[in-house]
Image: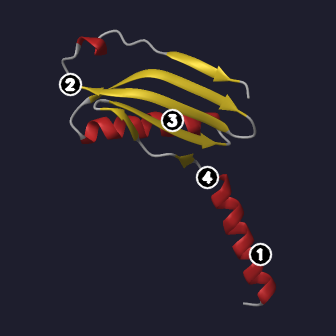
Amino acid sequence: MNKLTTTAIVMAITFLSACGVKTSGVRSLSPDTYTISADDLDEAVAKGTALGLAENHCNEIGKKMLVTQVYKQHRVRYTYDVKFQCLESGDPRLDNPEYETIYRSE
C-alpha cells in the first residue's frame, strides 16, 4: 500500500467512528436510580441505544426498568439523556408508568 492509500483508509475509519453512536454508560444517581445518555446522527438510534442499555442494566441485576425522565436535544446530533430506576418486578410503580420528555433547545 502506498502512503496516499494508507492515509485515505485512516481518514475513512476516523470519519466512520466519529459518526457512530456515543454513550456515557450507566451512572448511578442513588441506590436504584440511574442515568445514561446516548447521541447519534439518527434520532431513533440515539433513543433506542439509551433505552436499550438502560434496560440491559436493570436486567443484569435482576430488576425491571422504569423510565422517569427523558431529555432530548438536537443540534447536529440527537442526544437522549434517560433517567431510570431498576425496580423489583412486583413494584406497583411498574403498573402504569409515566414519564415526561423534556426538549432542550440549546
Whole-percent x, y for residue 60 in the image = 26, 42
Where does label 4 land, which residue? 20
Instruction: Indicate which disc residue 88 carries.
Output: 2
Q: Which mark sits nearer the N-terminus, 2 or 1?
A: 1
Residues under labels 4 and 1: Cα distance?
19 Å
Q: Quadrant of the C terminus?
A: top right
The circle on residue 58 is: none
Query: Which secondary structure lies at badge 3?
Result: helix
Q: CA distance from mark 2 to mark 4?
A: 33 Å
The earlier-in-sequence mark between 3 and 4 is 4
For the N terminus, the image quarter is: bottom right
Mark 4 or mark 1: whose residue is earlier in sequence:
1
Identity, as a three-letter code, of the amino acid under mark 4: Gly
> Badges 3 and 4: C-beta atoms under 8 Å apart?
no
Q: Is residue 96 left or right of residue 75?
A: left
Give amino acid for label 1.
Ala
Q: Is residue 4 left or right of residue 90?
A: right
Residue position for label 3 = 48
- Mark 1 or mark 3, which has the lower sequence index? 1
SS assignment at label 2: loop
Q: Residues within 10 Å of mark 2 (few under 14, many from 20)?
A: some
Percent x, y of residue 82: 48, 30
Residue 66 occupies which quadrant of the picture? top left
